[in-house]
Structures are given as structure tokens and as C-alpha cells.
């Protein structure tokens, strides 16, 4: 638990940054931090080919498939050849894929990375080869190496959906938390934002906090144990929708369907269906397709002009999804 408290401290710092630079607003425009501008160093020319590598976690997760597909479609529409591959959250495999991109003389790399620390060396290696990297969804612990780092405003999104959770709970009662991977900065940011809201209510009591590593099966097992040990529980906050789905399945198996408030973060179709049938309170949509398309557009501009015209670190606000607007959500895209 002490290890995760360190992450929460990191999350709190990032939350403050997000609040200052993004204003924690509700619009869906990208906000930028004051990180180094992409034009502050000599422009990278690319490896010489017309290939854009798209490197993400496994496409078996619909979120990562959506961002990979959106990036590929946008790149092809701009005339690029695409190689879309997965590192499966394995930093060693990711390093090998960066090596492949360098060998193929890729024009640019789009990457949803396999670790904030472990990815720094891979991005630097590509940079040394003249190939610019554009990071999506997850930041790395370094600046001035990637050209862009475009991520969802996890602080704003988690805080917004936590407010809906408190409302659903009636501002009181016992609840549990399922945490994401402790190595992922997003896990700490989301948890910190959840608690920034919930901890203001003295009648709400967290009775369990378990790491489920973003996984549905693990979340299901952890929730089963939590429910058995805490028969009065009224809610579960989840770091992502995948874990929320595991929690909901355990709740149904315990005969408690519709009696326990559940929130997540992502905006998946599965979450949308759960919100519609009343088994989930809501989710914070990370605009995966939009972020991926932004990365491709910035890569194209950078390769042609030597700059994106934007700061390296960029935040894209989440959309809070509840029963009131869930019909506007499909495949991580929200349409008014």
C-alpha cells in the first residue's frame, strides 16, 4: 500500500498541473501545458520512408484497438503507409518494435507506451535515428524527447465522474476501490482525483482498496472477496471500465445487481451498455479516437514543416457519461 501512496503523491502533483494548465474545464478542446515546444530543438526528418509505425497495447482491448484503428485510418488518408503493432504492455517487446521501426526507416512513430520510465530509452533511440515519436494516452517520465505527448485529462475526468458517484451514493455509505497498475501514472492520477472529491464527505467510508491491474478477471475476483468481507458496501470506484466490468459481474453473481454504484474511466461500449441497463452509474470518456487522430495530424505537420506549432504535453478533456447522455457515445466517440 505504501508504494501506491507514493503514486498518489505523484498523482496529486500531476492533478495540480492539470488544474492549472487545463483549467479542469468541461469543453473537449485540447489544452496544452507549458512543456518544451516541439520547435525548441532541431527538427527530426524521419527515417526516410513513408511508413508510420503505430505501437499500442493489445488490440484485444477495445480502447487500444480504437486508437490504433483511428490512427491508421487518418495516416492512410494522408498518404502514409502504416504498420500497426502491439507491445502487449511488455517494455522489452516495445523496445524491439522501436528497433523494427528504425530498421524500416519509419517516418514517425505513434505510441501508447508500455511504461513511463521504460519507454524513455526507446523514444530516445528513435530520436537519435532522426525519427520523431508522438505519444498518446500515456505520458513518459521525460520531456524534450518525444515531439508530442497527447493524453486524456485524467484528473478532470476522474474528478467529474467521482462527483456522480457521490451523488448516486447519497453522500454516505461504505465503498471500495479497484486500482490500476501501480507502474502506470494514470492509475495514481485517477485515484487521487477520485479521493479529492469523495474524501470531502465524512459519511463516505472506504472499506477496501485493491489493485486489479486494469484487468477484468482480476477485478472480478477481487470484488468477490470484497463483497464477502463487506456486506454493507454501497459502491465501487474503478480506475478503468475493464475493471468495472469485472466488478459488475461479481455484483450480479452475488445477487446485488443494481444495488451497488459503480464508476469507471474509459468510455467503452461495454460501459455504455451497463449504464443503460442500470448496473453502472457512469464513466469518464477518454476520447481515444480523437487523441490518435491528433497525433497523426501533428506528425504529418511536423514532418512537413519541422514543428507542430504546439507544446509537447497536451491534455484533452474527458466527457462525463451517465444515463442522461450515454446514447451519444459509441466506440469511444461522443457525438452531440
Image (cartoon, grey):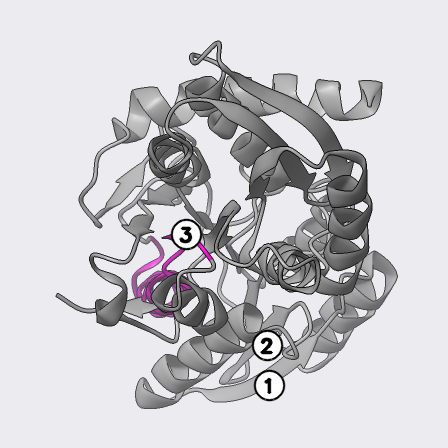
* Secondary structure character of the magenta stretch overall: helix
Query: Residue 243 or 53: which is nearer the viewer?
Result: 243
Tell me the residue at 39%/76% (across/down).
Answer: 331
Could you tell me which secondary element the residue under label 3 belongs to? strand
With respect to residue 323, does 20 lie above or below?
A: above
Report whether residue 334 is seen: yes
Label 1 belongs to which residue? Answer: 83
Q: Nearer the viewer, mark 3 or mark 2?
A: 3
Mark in the foreground, 3 or 1? 3
Pick whichever of labels 3 and 1 is earlier in the sequence.
Answer: 1
Q: Point out the image quarter for the N terminus.
A: top right
Q: Nearer the viewer, residue 275 or 25?
A: 275
Assess whether residue 300 is covered by the magenta stretch: yes
Q: Is residue 264 left or right of residue 47?
A: left
SS class, disc 2:
loop
Q: Which residues are magenta?
A: 280-307
Residue 211 seen from this side: no
Amino acid at each position: 500500500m505504501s508504494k501506491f501512496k507514493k503514486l498518489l503523491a505523484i498523482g496529486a502533483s500531476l492533478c495540480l498541473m492539470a488544474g492549472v494548465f487545463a483549467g479542469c474545464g468541461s469543453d473537449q478542446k485540447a489544452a496544452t501545458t507549458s512543456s518544451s515546444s516541439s520547435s525548441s530543438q532541431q527538427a527530426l526528418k524521419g527515417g526516410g520512408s513513408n511508413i508510420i509505425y503505430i505501437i499500442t497495447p493489445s488490440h484485444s482491448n477495445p480502447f487500444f484497438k480504437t486508437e490504433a484503428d483511428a490512427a491508421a485510418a487518418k495516416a492512410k488518408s494522408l498518404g502514409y503507409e502504416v504498420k500497426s503493432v502491439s507491445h502487449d504492455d511488455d517494455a522489452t517487446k516495445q523496445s524491439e518494435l522501436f528497433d523494427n521501426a528504425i530498421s524500416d526507416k519509419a517516418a514517425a512513430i505513434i505510441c501508447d507506451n508500455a511504461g513511463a520510465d521504460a519507454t524513455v530509452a526507446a523514444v530516445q533511440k528513435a530520436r537519435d535515428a532522426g525519427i520523431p515519436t508522438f505519444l498518446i494516452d500515456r505520458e513518459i517520465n521525460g520531456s524534450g524527447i518525444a515531439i508530442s505527448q497527447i493524453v486524456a485529462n485524467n484528473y478532470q475526468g476522474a474528478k467529474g465522474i467521482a462527483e456522480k458517484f457521490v451523488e448516486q451514493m447519497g453522500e454516505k455509505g461504505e465503498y471500495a476501490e479497484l486500482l490500476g497498475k501501480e507502474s502506470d501514472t494514470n492509475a495514481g492520477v485517477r485515484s487521487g482525483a477520485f479521493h479529492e472529491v469523495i474524501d470531502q464527505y465524512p459519511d463516505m467510508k472506504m472499506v477496501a482498496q485493491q489493485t486489479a491491474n486494469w484487468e477484468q478477471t482480476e477485478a472480478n475476483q477481487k470484488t468477490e472477496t470484497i463483497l464477502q468481507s463487506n456486506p454493507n458496501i454501497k459502491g465501487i470506484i474503478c480506475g478503468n471500465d475493464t475493471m468495472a466490468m469485472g466488478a459488475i459481474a461479481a455484483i450480479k453473481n452475488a445477487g446485488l445487481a443494481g444495488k451497488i454504484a459503480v464508476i469507471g474511466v474509459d468510455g467503452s461500449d461495454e460501459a455504455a451498455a451497463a449504464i443503460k441497463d442500470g448496473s453502472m452509474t457512469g464513466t469518464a470518456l477518454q476520447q481515444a479516437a480523437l487523441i490518435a487522430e491528433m497525433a497523426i495530424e501533428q506528425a504529418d505537420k511536423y514532418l512537413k514543416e519541422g514543428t507542430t506549432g504546439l507544446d509537447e504535453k497536451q491534455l484533452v478533456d474527458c466527457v462525463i457519461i451517465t444515463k442522461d447522455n450515454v446514447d451519444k457515445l459509441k466506440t469511444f466517440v461522443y457525438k452531440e
